Amino acid sequence: MRFVIIGMALVFAGFVTLGALGADYRAASIESDEFGTCHTYPKDGEPVETDCSTRVAEQALFFALIACIIGAGIFSLIRGARGDWDSKVKPEDMVGPGKDG
């Protein structure tokens, strides 16, 4: 049961992070494909030209990180759904109100 909850939380966190922060990284590949140059847009100044390959590499790294988080969540979900290992507790290791002796 714990792995199912952890898996759901990881998958949810991965998709929320990708949705919230993914637009900034998607813009780099669109700029490099359409215009050939990339720019950063500071809040208080003119756009500054930047290296497109660096921004696309950052985009790939961000996507790989999010894919790893979602993959870990899926692995955890599968492990939690398939396993009954957490319910197989030795009688001498049991604690709580149902313990005899």
Image (cartoon, rainbow, N blue to C red):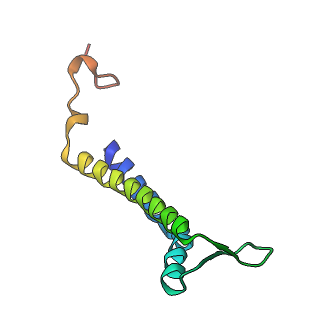
Q: Residue furthest right?
A: 44
Judge left or right: residue 73 versus residue 30.
left
Say which residue appears at 48% left-offset and 63% top-offset: 57
Say which residue appears at 39% left-offset and 58% top-offset: 11
Position in image of residue 63 (x %, y %): 44, 63
Position in image of residue 88 (x %, y %): 20, 31
Q: Is residue 44 above or below residue 2?
A: below
Q: Is residue 77 above or below residue 35?
A: above
Most foreground residue, 54 or 60:
54
Position in image of residue 27 (x %, y %): 54, 77
Position in image of residue 87 (x %, y %): 23, 35
Numbered disc total: 0
Say which residue appears at 38% left-offset and 54% top-offset: 68
Judge left or right: residue 6 versus residue 58.
left
Q: Is residue 95 above or below residue 28?
A: above
Judge left or right: residue 48 versus residue 21.
right
Q: Is residue 58 above or below residue 69?
A: below
Quick one: quadrant of the N terminus? Answer: top left
Task: Determine which quarter of the picture holds residue 66.
Answer: bottom left
Most foreground residue, 73 or 95:
73
Quick one: quadrant of the C terminus? Answer: top left
